[in-house]
Structure formats: C-alpha cells, structure tokens
Amino acid sequence: MRRVRTKRKSGFTLIELLVVIAIIAVLVSLLLPAVQQAREAARRSQCKNNLKQLGLALMNYESSYNVLPMEKITFTTGAGKVDQTWTLMVLPFIDQQPLYNQYNFSVMWADPTQYPVTTARLSVWACPSAPPIQDRTDPNSIPAFNPAGFPAPPQGYGACDYMALSGVRASLYLVYGLPMPPILSLSVVNVSATPGPISQKENRWPCAMHSTKETKISEITDGTSNTMMIAEDAGRPGVWRSKRRIQTPGIVTSDGWGWADTGNSGAIDGATDDGTIVNSSSKATPPAYPTCAAGACPGTCLINCNSDSEIYSFHIGGAQTVFADGSVHFISENISAATLGALLTRNGGDIVGEY
C-alpha cells in the first residue's frame, strides 16, 4: 500500500512575521533621527552660505563706497521723505541688479506699486530651516497694517530671515548686573557734527551697522572680527516664542514682513525664557545712563526666545551671525551676556571672551 506524502508549504508563521515587522520598526526608529539630522545639517549649511553671500555683498558695498550702509536710508522726494532699507542697497551685490533697477526709491517699499519687486522670493534672504511663508502668520488674517499704512499683498512679501544688528540695549547689562560700555560710545546718532550738547535720548550702543548713519570701517574700533553685523531673525512676520518654536496666533512682528521692509534691523534687548516679555530699557540723555523701570526688564534669555527684532533661529542650540569682516559664526544660546555684549558693540572697548 502506497503512502500519500503530504507536501508542506513553506512560509512565515504569524509569530515570525511579527518579529520581522518589529525589527524593521526598530531599524526605522534608529535611522529616522539620523536622516533628520542630516537634512537639518544641509539646511543649516545653506543658511550659512546665504549669510556668507550677504556678508560678501556688504564687504563689496564698503569697497565701492568706503562705508557700510545705514540700516534705514531716507530719500527726500517731491512728496517728502521716504524711508528705504539696507537690503535694497545690496541688491546689485547679490546679482539682483535688474530687481534694483525696477524698484522705485521715490515710493515707500510697502506701496502696492512695488509688489512686482517686493513679493519676489529670493533664496538668499530665506533660511531653509525656517517655516515656509505659508506656515507663517499672514498679516492680512488679523488684519494688520504695516507702519506705512498698507496691507500685505495677498501672496505675501518675499520672506527675510536675517536682520542687521543696530545695537545692544542697556537692558542686557542691567539684567545681568554688568557694567555698561562708556557713555560716549552710546549710539552716535546723538552726537552732533560739531562739539556741543547732546539733545537726543538713547538706550543702545551701536553694532557694526548704524540705524541712521553710514559706518566707516575705522569706526569699528573693537575690530571687525570682534563685532557682529547681521544675525538671524527667522520666521517673520509670525511671532515665534521660546526655544520650543511656538508661533503666537493673532499677532505679527512690528516689522520685517519681507526683505524689502525698512525694519530689517534690531537692537538686542533680551526676553523671558518663554518669550512672552521682551525687555524694555528707558532712554537717557548722556551723561546719564539708561535705566530699566521696575518690572520692565525681567528676561535673561538672549537668543532664540522671541522673533520680534531679537536674535532668533530654527537651528538647535543657537543662531548664525555675520561679523564685520564678513565671516559667519554660529553663536550658542548659552553664550554669556558679557561676551555677547562685547561682540555686539563696535566701540565699547570691551574684551571678547570665548564663544
């Protein structure tokens, strides 16, 4: 009698299949952070390259005109005075001469007639690590109007994640109990061309670039390699707070809505760790020093706590800056207030520590 031989079908049992799935899941969980880190490293490298281009543009501008541009330039036209920004002045030096030629310097940057220029998306002004423009608060959704009285264009302005540093305010020193720089090095906008009394109040010491005055390299007496010129201020016009990168709904920054905005500059005040309060020191007329009113300067966070005219990035651990010699440096969130203050001032006579 012949026996019938049964054929066993080869395959995975349910338990074997579950084990394979579990192993794949573990491998994915191990590889995913590495992939994300590699992507962020690439984005951070591109951001650094953007800043190198801007630093080189400013160096070429200085070579052409023997000065660094002021952050806000005022043109006198038939209709009166019109403010424009340093970002427009460097367009020819970042291969954007046609855009520069198309811009009307007799009209405010926010005028709708400027939209063909001001809505242009220029990659050199945008950090790849920052959220895309569609993920930032739209001023028209509030609605909000810029200081010139115009709404934002429906498609949004060309984003700008970098700002010129106009100074360091007294609050940085007062919060940490640090000695302030010499009163005579306070923002030189207060000093008349001829010797005489100082009449305008101020609360900041200037960085490499000045808010309303062109800067000669010789005026950066602390050294170009020791003085900051540009820093990240990413995510605008949305207001982002704390190192958790939380966007605050229903509000926008006071300026920096786009790369052509006249407000693409900021003086460093410091903020609370959650970013809800930005320090505010009172202005003073030299020889008196600025002060902080009771409760006006509670914040000890100097980097990545508030994106409204403060140093803010979407990189972990710090932000990238351009120095007055054109070099780019990553500045840690943990930098001491004394060292940051020394790097911000251009003529404070202070000694820069390690950073």
Image: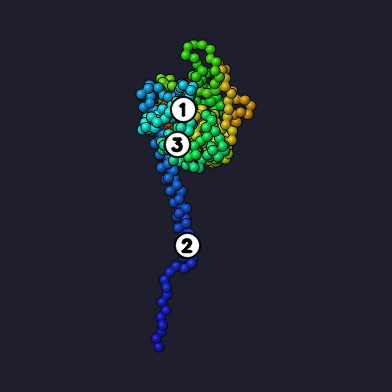
Q: Earlier in the sequence, mark 2 or mark 1?
A: 2
Position in image of residue 58 (x %, y %): 39, 28
> Which residue is most to the bottom?
1
Q: Residue 84 placed where, x, y %?
A: 46, 27
Give the residue type at disc 3.
Thr
Q: As displayed, is residue 198 above or below residue 174?
A: above
Q: Which mark is residue 107?
A: 1
The answer to whether 306 appears left or right of 24 in the picture is: right
Q: Residue at x 59, y 35 (%)?
A: 276
Label at residue 119: 3
Label 3: few (<14), some (14–19) or many (≥20) C-alpha neighbours in 10 Å: some
Front of the two marks 3 and 1:
1
Residue 275: percent from left, percent from top: 57, 36
| Marks 2, 1: nearer the viewer | 1
Q: Is residue 292 visible?
A: yes
- Residue of label 2: 19
Q: Is residue 173 visible?
A: no
Secondary structure of the residue carrying tag 3 is: loop
